[in-house]
Amino acid sequence: MAEIAAPDTRPVIVKKYANRRLYNTETSSYVTLEDLAAMVRQGRDFTVSDAKSGDDITRSVLTQIIVEEEAKGTNLLPIPFLRQLIGLYGDSMGAVVPRYLEATMGHFARQQEGVRRAAENAMGGFGGAAHAFEEIGKQNLAMFERAMSLFSPFPRGGNGAAPHPGGGQPSSAEEVEAMREEIATLRRELAELRAGEAGQA
């Protein structure tokens, strides 16, 4: 019996030339940002390198794909989130943001897959599964926005100052205590989401 070859899981090498054209070395053909976006959705990994210098420019190309998708009207990134993210560049807390975003999106993806499986297995239960997914999305977004506010370099409050019972600025100790309370709340919400996810499995 002939053995079935395992799928190739190695990243596809894409080269970007000076004329901004992208060349897929696996298919020996030129591709567009839309083609790369389709590869991401299919779960196919790829790296992009500058054809002349050999530098890895995967991050900048993925960012370009996001810009293109946002320009099409599929707005997944809320303006307040974008402002907070920009404010974190150069901030001392910026180093922890990549790990936090990766963990948060990974958790969201696992929940998304769980809801999809529930929708496929349920007989006539698509409406209920869709509602469950919507609720999970709302919970994740609320938790995500609250966590991002902890990293924000801008003062809280609409007038640029954090609210304080005495009308003045809060002390450092009060700010630390407030952040601890926020983090404790986030941990409880994350534990509840994980418990719900385990119950759907």
Image (cartoon, rainbow, N blue to C red):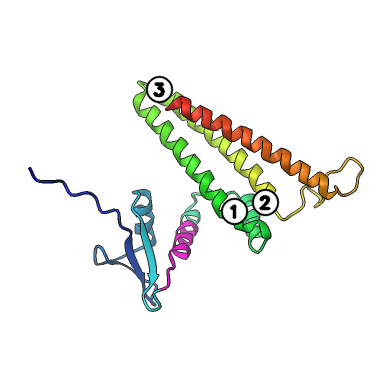
Instruction: Please provide the residue range marked out in magenta.
Output: 55-68
Prevailing secondary structure class for the magenta stretch in the rendered image: helix
Residue of label 3 = 125
Where is residue 160? Give x, y as percent: 80, 52
Query: Is 156 situated left or right of 199 in this image?
Result: right
Where is residue 94? Give x, y as percent: 63, 58
Disc 2 to disc 3, C-alpha distance:
39 Å
Residue of label 2 = 151
Query: Is 181 situated left or right of 107 in this image?
Result: right
Where is residue 167? Give x, y as percent: 91, 45
The three-letter amino acid code for the residue at tag 1 is Val
Tell me which numbered mark, 2 or 3, is placed earlier along the sequence.
3
Q: Is residue 162 visible?
A: no
Residue 97 image label: 1
Disc 1 to disc 3, C-alpha distance:
37 Å
Per the image, is 132 magenta? no
